[in-house]
């Protein structure tokens, strides 16, 4: 027997035995809750996110956005280019969804289990 595409000899494979049935039950992994408004391990809560957004918008080259004829100088164009590249990256990082931190102290048994672990 020959392959009809490359004209190489075809190797015959031996069939495998079918898999044995198991009694194991697998539960699908639940996806963790993710939020943009609750504080995560590497992100701030809503106050920090809004403050960082305000700071990023405050550094926007507002004079360069009204038109290039009214720009303060050639450095405004460079500022506009740098800000338009950096601001989306920073805001995307700040506003990404993340698994929130549980700030509740829990019961005394929970605290003991965390300390012993």
Image (spheres, rainbow, N blue to C red):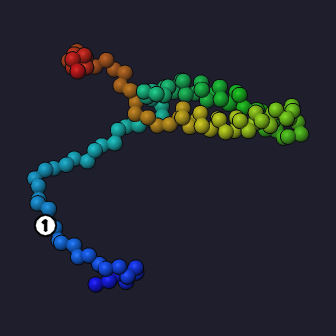
Q: Nearer the viewer, residue 57 or 37?
A: 57
Horizontal arrangement in the rendering, residue 49 relative to residue 87 (left or right):
left
* Mark 1 residue crowding within 10 angstroms, few (<14) / some (14–19) / many (20+): few
User: Residue 87 location, x and y as percent?
Assistant: 64, 35
User: Residue 23 location, x and y as percent?
Assistant: 10, 53
Up the image or down, 27 lies above or below 9; here it is: above
Q: Nearer the viewer, residue 5 or 9?
A: 9
Horizontal arrangement in the rendering, residue 76 relative to residue 18 (left or right):
right
Residue shown at 71% from the left, 28% from the top: 59
Horizontal arrangement in the rendering, residue 66 relative to residue 21 (left or right):
right
Q: Which residue is mark 1?
A: 17
Q: Residue 82 appears in which quarter of the rendering? A: top right
Quadrant that contains the N terminus: bottom left
Quadrant that contains the C terminus: top left
Residue shown at 26% from the left, 76% from the top: 11
Give the structural element (helix, strand or loop) at label 1. Answer: loop
The residue furthest right is 69
* Residue 110 makes an appearance in the image: no
Q: Nearer the viewer, residue 4 or 41?
A: 4
Q: Nearer the viewer, residue 52 or 82?
A: 82
Residue shown at 40% from the left, 33% from the top: 99
Residue shown at 11% from the left, 59% from the top: 21
Horizontal arrangement in the rendering, residue 103 relative to residue 96 (left or right):
left
* Residue 94 makes an appearance in the image: yes
User: Residue 98 location, x and y as percent?
Assistant: 44, 34
């Amino acid at each position: 027997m020959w392959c009809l595409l490359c004209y190489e000899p075809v190797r015959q494979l031996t069939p495998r035995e079918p898999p044995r049935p198991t009694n194991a039950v697998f539960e699908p992994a639940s996806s963790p809750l993710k939020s943009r408004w609750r504080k995560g391990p590497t992100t701030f809560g809503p106050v920090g996110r809004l403050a960082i957004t305000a700071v990023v918008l405050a550094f926007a080259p507002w004079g360069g956005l009204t038109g290039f004829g009214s720009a303060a100088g050639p450095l405004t164009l460079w500022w506009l280019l740098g800000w338009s590249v950096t601001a989306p990256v920073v805001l995307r990082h700040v506003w990404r969804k993340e698994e929130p931190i549980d700030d509740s102290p829990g019961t005394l048994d929970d605290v003991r289990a965390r300390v012993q672990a």
